[in-house]
Image: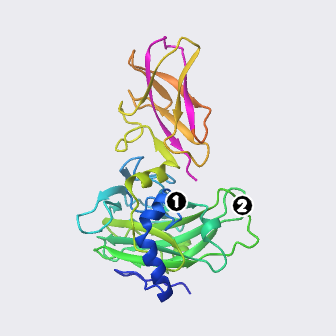
Amino acid sequence: MLAFTPSLGLKKPAQNELADIDVLNSNMDTIDAVIPLSNMARQAIINGNFDVWQRGASFTDPVNAIYTSDRWQHYFLNTGTSAGPITHSRQTVTAGDLPGSTFYYRVQTNGSGSGFGTDNVDQIAQKIENGVRYLCGDGKKVTVSFCARSSIPGKRLGVSLQQNYGIGGSNPENISGSTFTLTSTWMKYEFTFTSNTLADKLIADTNFLAVFFGFMWGDIYVPVFNSGTPETYVGTGNIDIAQVQVCAGDVALPFQPRSSADELALCQRYFEKSYNISVTPGAIASDGALGWEASGSTFTGTNVIYKVKKRMNATVTLYSPGTGLPGKIYNQSTNADVAALPERNGENGFKAIVNNVGVSATQLLQVHYTADAEL
């Protein structure tokens, strides 16, 4: 039987665990110095404090599979009447409300909606790289903790897991979670899952453990969230989430944010951009753009070295700083775009190439880019 403890505090750990936790908390600076970018050393979620939003800070009616806050992917299916617009956004914490946090994740609804299909769902998820291999197994437990609230009376939030064995691996397995009826004030919740055995499973290098938060779901997802009944948006208002953690075992450690630099670097292993952090990719912006002087050869280009080595060869998109259009390099000397493409994509970087048709030697060229290596 799975159990959960919604509370303002945490489950009390066993006496023999207290000393270990005290030592861990008192030595986190040392641990971070030794393993500065390890997302498994203390807890497994990246950007659980919702500090990093490289793709933008607000998304109205985001489509299925889009990434919103870094590492958080939105899954959406609605075959009924929309309760839109639905907005997913970054919000700033009121001082004193959530010690250790600056931002939180908000879903803003516009009515309860109607006519939802049995397979409808609106949820966000994070895929923990190698989470199956490192966190799961026969009898192993995983504890999800988070803070949440809602201005919608009686609004429920669903939480579940999926053991995904990766491309070419065994079939994914959903692990039923629970639902939490939120209040209008911040509350801390936790739920301990028992993972499935790995015996006789084929585990690919692309395996992950996915953590899901459901805001609306149809009949098909009732067993997944162990909710008893489907859930609509219920009404107009906000659903807020903050301070998400996934800890190995049945104890939710006290929430402790990483430094801003470490959190950003962890996110950049999966996605990075040349734009300033506050600028959405595709914007007209020269700050941060890569620039070079065209040569007189048939092709000209510039080498790009990533800020952080990617987990795999990234999918690169080039943007013109002058117009914001994708697949273009901006000729600053003529104020015109030139068609371009990335070549030699690797884990460490790529080369932005433009055919010198319409480009003359010594002209100044500029380009922005995004590099996507998500699971």
Q: Is residue 135 above or below residue 286?
A: below
Contact check, label 1 and label 2, Cβ < 8 Å: no
Mark 2 nearby-residue class (10 Å; few <14, some 14–19, many ≥20): some
Question: Marks 1 and 2, Cα distance to the nearest angstrom?
Answer: 25 Å
Decide if residue 315 is in sight here: yes
Residue 272 in the image: state x and y as whole percent: 47, 44
Q: Residue at x 36, y 74 (%)?
A: 155
**Label 2, on which residue?**
169
Tell me the magenta residue range. 349-375
Amino acid type indicated by mark 2: Gly
Amino acid type indicated by mark 1: Ser
Secondary-structure class at tag 2: loop
Secondary-structure class at tag 1: loop
Task: Name the residue nearer the viewer: 116 or 261.
Answer: 261
Q: Is residue 314 above or below residue 358?
A: below
Residue 38, labelled with which disc? Answer: 1
Q: Is residue 311 above or below residue 216?
A: above
Q: Is residue 357 above or below residue 248?
A: above
Outermost residue, left side: 95
Which numbered mark, 1 or 2, is in the foreground of this view?
A: 1
Residue 82 in the image: state x and y as whole percent: 41, 59
Outermost residue, right side: 200
Q: Quadrant of the N terminus?
A: bottom right
Decide if residue 231 is in sight here: no
Residue 129 in the image: state x and y as whole percent: 58, 59
Task: Name the residue nearer the viewer: 104 or 247.
Answer: 247
